Image (cartoon, rainbow, N blue to C red):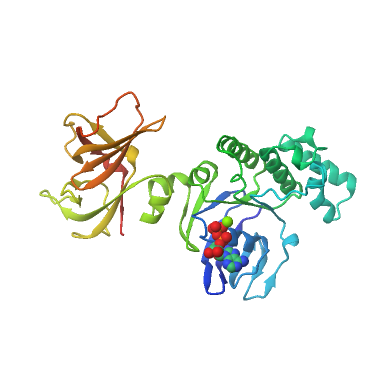
């Protein structure tokens, strides 16, 4: 399968810039997710790639084929791009059976009926729906309908699969199950896939690479673990998972070791990149699961803060605390749910120095 390369892709609607000079490579067989809040330009990017709308600038390449280029005045129509798209709304024909829905795209491509039927049945088998081929969409559950639309997309043997929030209409439990199904399907077929979602958990579970979009621009593109552990800026840190964003100033301690001084005056030690000089104003991003709570003063010499429990929420798999360290509220998640700290209790916090990200905002 070919790679997809977006170069300087640009699209505006009137004065609104929806896609702001995006540069991105989706590698051969990769599952890449465009992740970002509603209105950040994900769907527009996908529709540009599919060819449903025309860009105002830049280029789209699929392998060695240029499918869209403003400069070279190239605009390959959607049906010739060897792509298939799956929508949040399933978009099935209500008056056609499951089989006819899947065959439809093949017949419009002038594939003979018997060959089209065979291919459609193979695709339905891949999504475990072969026995429901004669049903109509209204006789299927939401999850089954979405599997039909996956089958319909796969049946055309696309080189690139585009999915726009395909699981958003399903209830939470089914959505979770379908994530695994989708990932498995991708593992089997290895089609270069571009997936759009606003759901960071979904992006983390499914993707080889996450591309975080904010106001039409890419903020960071890298594998899930990297974006979670090393967010490039506060917006990314805040959007992916939960984090404590703490303003701090870089200072040297008595032994000339650099540390970040937070609002309480405490020094937080971590790996501080060389580009942060003495007195630099920074923000620390510290995930709530990387902070430990102790009732008594722990043996750690560094990164120990004194706090007072202010709020406590039991969530089933963790206890989510809000702890005041002087004026600042720090969120801490504890996964051992057998120990509860009481509200107003004095505690000590220890911050793992390896898990502190220093950000420049
Ligand atoms: N056809 C259109 N005409 C005018 N504005 C549009 C159109 N399509 C999208 N937009 C605007 O472009 C921005 C990006 O939209 P979209 O790509 O749909 O975001 P997302 O899919 O990330 O929620 C939004 O502000 C949206 O209102
Ligand atoms: Mg959208």
User: As displayed, is residue 53 above or below residue 83?
Assistant: below
Residue 273 located left or right of residue 92: left
In this rendering, the count of numbered labels is 0
Q: Position of residue 122 (x, y in %)?
A: 78, 39
Residue at 82%, 47% (x, y): give it: 95
Most foreground residue, 264 or 121: 264
Residue at horizontal 41%, vertical 53%?
Answer: 236
Residue at 59% from the left image edge and 35% from the top image edge: 177
Going 62% across and 65% down the picture, which residue do you hit?
A: 60
Q: Nearer the viewer, residue 170 or 113?
A: 170
Res. 252 visible in picture? yes
Image quadrant assignment for residue 347? top left
Horizontally, residue 117 falls left or right of residue 47, namely right
Residue 202, compared with residue 217, is above or below; it is: above
Q: Position of residue 221 (x, y in %)?
A: 48, 55
In what quadrant does ligand 1 lie?
A: bottom right
Is residue 233 shown to the viewer in this render? no
Of the 4 image quadrants, the one containing the C terminus is bottom left
- In the image, 234 versus 352, the foreground residue is 234
* x then y, percent, for residue 141: 69, 37
Identify the residue at the far top of this view: 338
Q: Is residue 338 left or right of residue 151?
A: left
Q: Position of residue 67 (x, y in %)?
A: 68, 65
């Amino acid at each position: 399968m070919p790679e997809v390369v977006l170069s300087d892709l640009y699209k505006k609607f009137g004065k609104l810039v929806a896609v702001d000079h995006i540069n991105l490579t989706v590698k051969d067989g990769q599952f890449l997710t465009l992740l970002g809040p509603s209105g950040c330009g994900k769907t527009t990017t996908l529709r540009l790639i599919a060819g449903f709308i025309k860009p105002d600038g830049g280029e789209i390449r699929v392998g060695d084929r240029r499918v869209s280029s403003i400069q070279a005045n190239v605009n390959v129509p959607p049906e010739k791009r060897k792509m298939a798209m799956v929508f949040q709304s399933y978009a099935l024909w209500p008056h056609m059976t499951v089989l006819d829905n899947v065959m439809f795209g093949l017949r419009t491509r002038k594939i003979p009926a018997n060959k089209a039927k065979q291919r459609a049945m193979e695709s339905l088998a891949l999504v475990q729906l072969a026995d429901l081929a004669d049903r109509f969409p209204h006789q299927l559950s939401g999850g089954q309908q979405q599997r039909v639309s996956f089958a319909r997309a796969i049946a055309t043997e696309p080189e690139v699969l585009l999915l726009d929030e395909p699981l958003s209409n399903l209830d939470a439990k089914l959505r979770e199950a379908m994530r695994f199904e989708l990932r498995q399907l991708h593992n089997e077929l290895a089609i270069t896939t571009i997936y759009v979602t606003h759901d960071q958990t979904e992006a983390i579970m499914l993707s080889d690479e996450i591309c975080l979009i904010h106001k039409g621009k890419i903020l960071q593109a890298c594998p899930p673990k990297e974006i979670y552990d090393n967010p490039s800026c506060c917006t990314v840190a805040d959007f992916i998972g939960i984090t404590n964003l703490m303003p701090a100033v870089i200072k040297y301690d008595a032994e000339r070791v650099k540390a970040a001084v937070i609002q309480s005056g405490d020094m937080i030690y971590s790996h501080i990149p060389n580009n942060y000089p003495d007195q630099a104003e920074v923000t620390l991003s510290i995930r709530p699961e990387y902070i430990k709570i102790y009732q008594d003063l722990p043996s750690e010499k560094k990164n120990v803060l004194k706090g007072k429990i202010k709020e406590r929420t039991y969530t089933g798999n963790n206890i989510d605390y809000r702890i005041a360290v002087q004026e600042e509220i720090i969120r801490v998640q504890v996964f051992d749910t057998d120990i509860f700290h009481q509200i107003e209790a004095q505690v000590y916090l220890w911050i793992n120095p390896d898990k502190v990200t220093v950000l420049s905002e």
